[in-house]
Amino acid sequence: MSRPGSRDPLFFRPLWIEVDDSALRRNLKHIRRHVGTRVKILATVKQEAYGHGLIPAARAFAAAGADLFGVGSLEEAIQLRKAGIKKEILLLSLLLPKYASYCLEYRVIPAVAGLALVRQLQKAAEKRACTVPVHLKIDTGMGRLGPYRRQAAELAEEIRSRYPRLEIDGVFTHFPVADTDPEFTRAQIEAFRGFVAQLRTAGVPVRLVHCANSAATLLFADSHFSLVRPGLALYGVQPASNTEFPLSPALSLKSRVIYRKIVPRGGSVSYGRTFRAKSSTRIATVAAGYADGYPWSASNRAQVIFKNCLCPQTGRVCMDHFMFRLPRGQDARIGDEVILLGKSSRRRVSAEQLAHWAGTIPYEILTRLSDRIPRIYRGNTKSR
């Protein structure tokens, strides 16, 4: 395994991500115990597995017993297949109709919400003389993808009666406020339950019924149906402020001090001169910035861990650098490690905390981490 500071050119710049495979596996197993053995788990690995690395994360979840994988693009599904992942893959977003044949070629289950894609899937299936499983997306309040209940029922009947090569293998919806509004979420669950009952009464057998994201998986047992779709929770981040589930954060972002100086009283730091020293101040610079995904909006608010101390980020975050104040009486040497996201033996900077400083959500903190940052994996998967 290559290490920061080795001769591997990936590490010429001292910035890297560490991912704990055992934490990923542990999180999935905790969710398995929570939902029971009768409920299938779809591991959501879209957007490079929330910044953790698509292929290594998928392998870790597969080893821990994930039943299916959920992706956000056909490209991700193809990458999984080429990496040897054999489990079912559900494309959670909508595919442009002209690419329908790829679902058959790579055994990807598409989400459908209208007839344009359905028609192309039917044509592709006729050419191959096969049946295509699809999951029907219904909108119960998200307002993003899928028809509302009446139109969804009409679409299901249209598929069943006129497109014999398509099988409605699943039906699903999505929650916008499972983490903050239980009343609205319960209303969605009941509306969804009613739609599923309507489908079955009409003679549409549905194998997989699912609506639960991470927050609903942990907070609403009646949302589990036959499948849950955890995402953020799999990576060790609490999906709601009122959840205290035993989750283990898997990702750390680290850099090294590349320069240090003493800024005199009245001296300023970084663009806009938003920080001015009230007294002589020791400042260290690290090799990370907003182009790497570290949030510019956290300027002068975030903290980093240096030698087990929380140190304030100082001045505006730059494209590929930012600065922090050293503790009183402390100095730094070139090459000293700095934890931007993660923990030391006594301190932690969580994705939730960094998101709070940046005025955003943990999802954005993780998924915006640049794919150019080298990832190091502890466990059975390889670094990249």
Image (cartoon, rainbow, N blue to C red):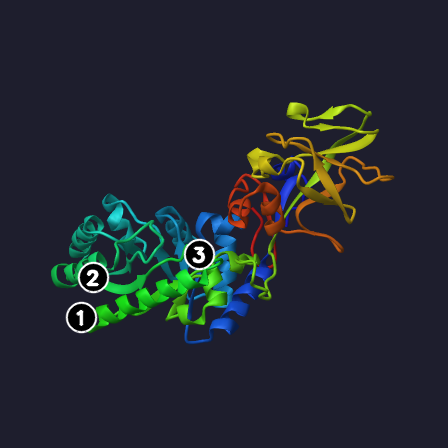
The quadrant holding residue 374 is top right
Q: Which mark is residue 153?
A: 2
User: Separation of disc 2 and disc 3 at Cα?
Assistant: 24 Å
Q: Are marks 2 and 1 in contact (CB under 8 Å)?
A: yes
Amino acid on which the number 2 mark rests in the picture: Ala
Q: Which residue is drawn at the image coordinates 40% and 60% (left, top)?
A: 184
Amino acid on which the number 1 mark rests in the picture: Ala
344 relative to 199, above or below: above
Q: Position of residue 39 (x, y in %)?
A: 41, 72
User: Separation of disc 2 and disc 1 at Cα?
Assistant: 9 Å
Q: Position of residue 235 (x, y in %)?
A: 55, 57
Q: Which residue is drawn at the image coordinates 31% and 65% (left, top)?
A: 191
Q: Which residue is drawn at the image coordinates 63% and 51% (left, top)?
A: 350
Q: Which mark is residue 177?
A: 3
Count of marks placed on residues: 3
Q: Is residue 197 left or right of residue 49?
A: left
46 relative to 297, above or below: below
| Element carrying mark 2 | helix
Residue 129 visible in the shown view: no
User: Which residue is disc 1 drawn over?
Assistant: 202
| Element carrying mark 3 | loop
Amino acid on which the number 3 mark rests in the picture: Val
